[in-house]
């Protein structure tokens, strides 16, 4: 039985200044998973809501086709930071970058989101 990584993430509200400090901090959230995800069955707005719902993170800020999200990995209280950008040139596509202290966690969360946004999610 496989357990999704997202059940081990807890949403936590922080400010954009706190998020910037976490991202720029040395050695903590260095494991990156990133990818362009096509949205065959969802609008960009729906996909942004899916990030919060599926990955158990809180929206930190959304503006200019970009949204940032934050959560805590409950196993060790480490940071999970997510950056989502809408493709301005193409409807139905987002760029997702997930940073944490674990490559397996970052990769797993990205896979979960890709599955939820993909063709099989409807």
Image (spheres, rainbow, N blue to C red):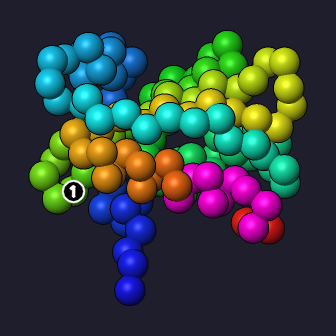
Left-right relation of 42 to 80 = right
Q: Quadrant of residue 74?
A: bottom left
Residue toward you, 97 or 77: 97
Q: Quadrant of residue 36?
A: top right
| Count of numbered labels shown in the rendering | 1
Residue identifier under label 1: 74
Q: Residue 64's x, y, as percent?
A: 67, 13
Q: Which residue is drawn at 15% across and 18% down?
A: 26
Quadrant the N terminus occupies:
bottom left
Q: Residue 33's x, y, as percent?
A: 43, 38
Q: Which residue is drawn at 37% across and 45% down?
A: 106
Left-right relation of 110 to 65 = left
Res 18 seen here:
no
Residue toward you, 11 or 51: 51
Q: Residue 82's x, y, as percent?
A: 45, 34
Residue toward you, 64 or 1: 1
Above-or-below relation of 23 to 72: above
Left-right relation of 40 to 120 = right
Q: Report crowding for label 1: few under 14, some 14 to 19, many 20 or more residues within 10 A (C-alpha).
A: few
Quadrant the C terminus occupies:
bottom right
Above-or-below relation of 70 to 60: below
Q: Residue at x 24, y 45 (%)?
A: 102
Above-or-below relation of 73 to 115: above
Q: Which residue is drawn at 17% across and 29% down?
A: 28
**What secondary structure do most residues of the magenta stretch adopt?**
helix
* Magenta stretch: includes residue 75: no
Above-or-below relation of 43 to 32: below
Give the structural element (helix, strand or loop) at label 1: loop
Q: Residue 56's x, y, as percent?
A: 44, 54
Which residues are the magenta region?
Answer: 112-120
């Amino acid at each position: 039985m496989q357990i999704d990584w997202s059940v081990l993430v807890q949403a936590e509200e922080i400010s954009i200044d706190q998020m910037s400090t976490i991202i720029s901090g040395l050695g903590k959230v260095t494991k990156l998973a990133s990818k362009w995800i096509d949205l065959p069955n969802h609008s960009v707005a729906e996909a942004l809501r899916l990030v919060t719902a599926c990955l158990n993170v809180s929206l930190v800020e959304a503006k200019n086709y970009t949204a940032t999200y934050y959560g805590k990995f409950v196993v060790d209280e480490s940071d999970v930071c997510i950056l989502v950008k809408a493709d301005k040139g193409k409807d139905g596509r987002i760029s997702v970058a997930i940073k944490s202290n674990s490559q397996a966690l970052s990769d797993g969360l990205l896979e979960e989101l890709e599955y939820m946004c993909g063709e099989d999610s409807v």
